[in-house]
Amino acid sequence: MGDLWWRHLIRVPERLAGCHRQRGEALQAPEPVPATGPNRHRPGKCVVLMRAVVTIPAMAIVITERLLVRDWTDGPVDLARLFEIYSRPEIARFLGSTSGLPLTDPGQAAERLARWRRRHAAYGDRYGIWAIEVRETGVVVGSVLVKPLPGRDEQVFTDDIEVGWHLHPEAWGNGYATEAARALVERELDTGTPLIHAVVAPGNIASMAVARRLGMTSVGRRSDWYGGEELETFVLARPA
Ligand SMILES: CC(C)(COP(=O)(O)OP(=O)(O)OC[C@H]1O[C@@H](n2cnc3c(N)ncnc32)[C@H](O)[C@@H]1OP(=O)(O)O)[C@@H](O)C(=O)NCCC(=O)NCCS
């Protein structure tokens, strides 16, 4: 897997860290802890906070034949990729005038990721905007999302759930958006959600084709979401 090195504050047993270490010092091979004296191991008081580099696999949301859908991470590879994707006019042009896209500076990637996390923090791993990684190469090709649709007031979520997709143009034409979204739609319907929506800017033929490939039905243009913008709407109901 790609960019999964995170810098973390971790709690480690004092006997591994060595009692004499300063907080914030990098974790190294443990030294023997004396059985007696001021640095001896004291059961019950054996954790210290240390800053260390650890490998934590980014949370996998779903795995399909070719893809891993997982959290975007704060690692430099993911952030660079996020910028590369969301700075492109081909991606931004269909994502609405209030999306704040395209990104214009690499520093905005971390900000954007933090915003996505804040927005969906209350939902745990059920709703969010996730990275699509090609399992064979480890390359992140875009995002797939499942989340409540923002209403006419964009700050307020409705009860309607949407699925969506954004792929780097290099990755178009491989079926990745459909494969990732299909797995997430199944996962969401399995939780009991009765209906999933896809909302698409008029003229976005490629995105409407993804919705149709997923078996979604067009219900025409609606303006109930995303600040009242008129959007082609597709729905998929949970099988009875
Ligand atoms: C919308 C978007 C994700 C569609 O990407 P896409 O690659 O066309 O869609 P899919 O991933 O489902 O791929 C389907 C294509 O892959 C082809 N394909 C190739 N190998 C395939 C495979 N193994 N399995 C399935 N399809 C495959 C299909 O034939 C189809 O090609 P076609 O459109 O020429 O018939 C992409 O255009 C995009 O990111 N646009 C910008 C962002 C955007 O508009 N997002 C939507 C906002 S509402």
Image (tube, rainbow, N blue to C red):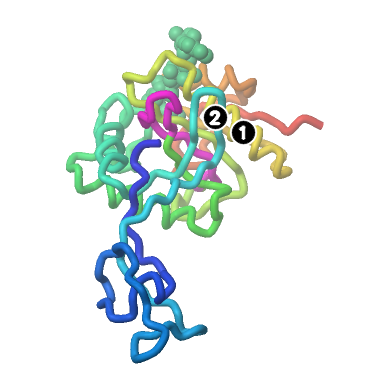
**Residue placed most toward the observer, 42 or 228:** 42
| Position of residue 111 measured from the top left corner of the image (x, y, whole percent) | 28, 52
The residue identified by callout 1 is 185
Magenta residues (range): 132-150
Q: Pointers 2 and 1 in contact (CB under 8 A)?
A: yes
* Left or right relative to 15: residue 158: right
Q: Which mark is residue 181?
A: 2
Magenta part, dominant SS: strand
SS at mark 2 in the image: helix
The residue positioned 43% from the left and 27% from the top of the image is 134
Residue 233: percent from the left, percent from the top?
A: 56, 29
Amino acid identity at mark 1? Val
Q: Is residue 68 above or below residue 98?
A: above
Q: Mark 2 near ligand 1 (CB under 8 Å)?
A: yes
Q: Tell me where residue 86 appears, x and y as whole percent.
A: 29, 35
User: Residue placed farthest to the bottom in the image?
Assistant: 37
Q: CA distance from mark 2 to mark 1?
A: 6 Å
Q: Quadrant of the C terminus?
A: top right
Quick one: 15 or 202, which is closer to the camera?
15
Q: Residues within 10 Å of mark 1 (few under 14, many from 20)?
A: many
Q: Kindly tell me whether residue 224 is visible in this rendering.
A: no
